[in-house]
């Protein structure tokens, strides 16, 4: 007997969805049984739904293909929404599957009932809830297609228990036609070239696929030919880094620094991104450092690195640009945020993935990584903290041959600390470096910017993570991850080297 649940799982597998991150409940029991029966979808348990969804995001950022995120009813989905929000901002393809009460039971408004479609709508590019088993196979197909369709996103499939359990006919799986690329018009390219020829008065902005290795190299050639300035988007989901690749600055986080950084520009060419916007708004009601009356050319395209190639060819044959790796300052002795990041950047293994949720302690790594071995950096996209450890899980599952380093601010790490258990259980090659400043340091800075210094005892207690001090070594060990605490550059080097040499996860608490 074939059931709806079997059809769902078979259809996903046929569409090359080979990984599931799950936190199931009663309404997902049939789906779990179907996963068990089919056996070809690797399924990993996570102990909170925000770990499930963040892991699916990390998986997508590496493979550009969806994993299945299996969660329980409305409350399970609600727990996972913060990291689905980040996944949406990252344009990560994710297929979220939510079990639902039987269709005939919904009107009774049982204790776990809620408006799942509304919850899903906040983060999803597609939401479907088939109520007849004969529609289920097509719905699975539509969900995967929606998640993969540029600009890519989260598709949420809600599956009632009676639909999961109903007898089903085998669904005929269809393959995807390659998504047609929507190319930019020739006039747009011409307008961009005219702007770029203004040299330093023009900024070339790079986002998404323009930050691939090819994109960065091509952008450097365009810059050398035109003397334009180049900035990368502030919160890239994925950035190729090190190994001799050109590195471009992003606009500083705080508005007062951002507008200074782009001063003198009057024209902007956007590839793979739209106009940058401030996280919390800027001075005089401004939302962007780019003034409203500046000249703007937006080259929206599904393949940003191809747009850069078009610009480069329109400028004529351009020579390669020899890369000058920046000098990285030597550091030793007691750790501070800067030296911790520089040390990680110096030791990053070739081909590694660095998940960067370093908070205020990130500039050392972010600057020095331009001189690192070639690696990929996955960052915070939607500003919702607690993504780092889950994204590291997804990245490690997606690339078992690479070392994943999670550079993790301590406050952010605590949002999804259960991730450590999944890392241990799945023996993932993840090195977690906790940057333990034992406070929400960014909020201290924000109080100062708001002119409310010195802050009162209550405000102070709301941004302080001591009393009691979090013991990351014991937290990690309690989740099955070996851990060590370091306070000097030398000990951090030793701990990193040991972790890179040993298979499986490890945690280093770097007290800064
Ligand atoms: C889900 C979510 N909750 C709360 C916040 C607000 N917030 C932003 S940064 C921050 C503290 C970050 O502290 P930590 O991760 O230790 O980094 P640090 O500032 O110390 O470098 C908080 C609470 C947020 N961005 N996202
Ligand atoms: Mg902190």
Image: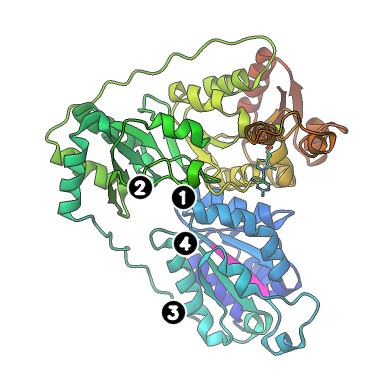
| Mark 3 nearby-residue class (10 Å; few <14, some 14–19, many ≥20) | few
Which residue is depicted at the point 22% across and 42% down? 309
SS at circle 2: loop
Q: Which residue is mark 1?
A: 63
Percent position of residue 23, x then y: 71, 61
Locate residue 287, reporting x and y percent: 47, 47
Q: CA distance from mark 1 to mark 2?
A: 37 Å
Residue sitting farthest toward the front: 284
In x, y percent, where is residue 278?
49, 44
Residue pointed to by mark 2: 292
Q: Say whether disc 3 or disc 2 marks the residue closer to the N-terminus.
A: 3
Which of discs 4 and 1 lies nearer the camera? The answer is 1
Mark 3 → mark 2, Cα distance in angstroms: 52 Å
- The stretch in magenta equals 95-99
| Mark number displayed over residue 172 | 3
- Dot 4 or dot 3, earlier in sequence: 4
Q: Nearer the viewer, mark 3 or mark 2?
A: 2
Answer with mark 2 or mark 4, whichever residue precedes in sequence.
4
Whole-angstrom CA distance, mark 4 to mark 1, is 11 Å
């Amino acid at each position: 007997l074939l059931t709806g649940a079997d059809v769902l799982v078979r259809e996903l597998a046929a569409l090359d969805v080979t990984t599931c991150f799950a936190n199931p409940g009663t309404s997902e029991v049939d789906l779990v049984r179907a996963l068990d029966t089919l056996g070809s979808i690797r399924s990993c348990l996570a102990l909170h739904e925000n770990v499930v969804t963040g892991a699916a995001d990390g998986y997508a950022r590496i493979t550009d293909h969806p994993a299945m995120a299996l969660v329980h009813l409305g409350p399970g989905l609600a727990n996972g929404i913060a990291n689905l929000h980040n996944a949406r901002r990252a344009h990560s393809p994710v297929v979220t599957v939510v079990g639902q009460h039987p269709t005939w039971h919904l009107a009774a408004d049982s204790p776990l009932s809620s408006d799942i479609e509304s919850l899903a709508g906040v983060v999803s590019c597609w939401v479907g809830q088939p109520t007849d088993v004969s529609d289920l196979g097509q719905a699975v197909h539509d969900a995967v297609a929606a998640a993969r369709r540029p600009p890519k996103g989260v598709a949420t499939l809600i599956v009632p228990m009676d639909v999961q359990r109903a007898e089903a006919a085998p669904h005929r799986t269809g393959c995807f036609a390659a998504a047609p690329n929507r190319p930019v018009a020739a006039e747009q390219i011409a307008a961009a070239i005219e702007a770029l020829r203004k040299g330093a008065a023009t900024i070339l902005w790079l986002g998404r696929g323009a930050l691939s290795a090819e994109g960065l190299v091509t952008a450097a050639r365009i810059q050398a030919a035109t003397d334009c300035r180049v900035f990368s988007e502030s919160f890239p989901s994925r950035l190729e880094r090190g190994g001799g690749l050109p590195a471009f600055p992003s606009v500083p986080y705080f508005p007062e620094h951002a507008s200074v950084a782009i001063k003198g520009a009057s024209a902007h060419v956007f590839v793979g991104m739209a106009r940058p916007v401030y996280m919390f708004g800027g001075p005089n009601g401004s939302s962007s450092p780019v003034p409203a009356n500046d000249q703007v050319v937006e080259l929206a395209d599904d393949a940003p690195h191809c747009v850069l190639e078009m610009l480069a060819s329109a400028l004529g044959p351009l020579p390669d640009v020899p890369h000058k790796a920046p000098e990285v300052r030597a550091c030793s002795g007691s750790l501070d945020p800067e030296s911790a990041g520089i040390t990680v950047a110096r030791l990053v293994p070739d081909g590694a993935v660095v998940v960067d949720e370093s908070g205020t302690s990130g500039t050392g790594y972010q600057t020095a990584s331009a001189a690192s071995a070639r690696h990929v950096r996955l960052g915070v996209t939607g500003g919702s903290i607690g993504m780092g450890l889950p994204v590291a899980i997804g990245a490690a599952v997606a690339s078992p041959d690479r070392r994943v380093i999670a550079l993790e601010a301590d406050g952010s790490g605590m949002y999804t600390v259960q991730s450590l258990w999944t890392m241990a259980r799945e023996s993932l090659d993840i090195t977690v470096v906790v940057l333990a400043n034992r406070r929400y340091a960014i909020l201290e800075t924000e109080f100062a910017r708001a002119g409310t210094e010195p802050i009162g005892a209550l405000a102070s207690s709301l941004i302080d993570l001591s009393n009691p001090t979090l013991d990351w070594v014991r937290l990690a060990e309690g989740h099955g991850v070996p851990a060590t605490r370091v306070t000097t550059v030398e000990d951090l080097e030793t701990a990193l080297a040991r972790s890179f040499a040993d298979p499986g996860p490890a945690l280093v608490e770097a007290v800064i």
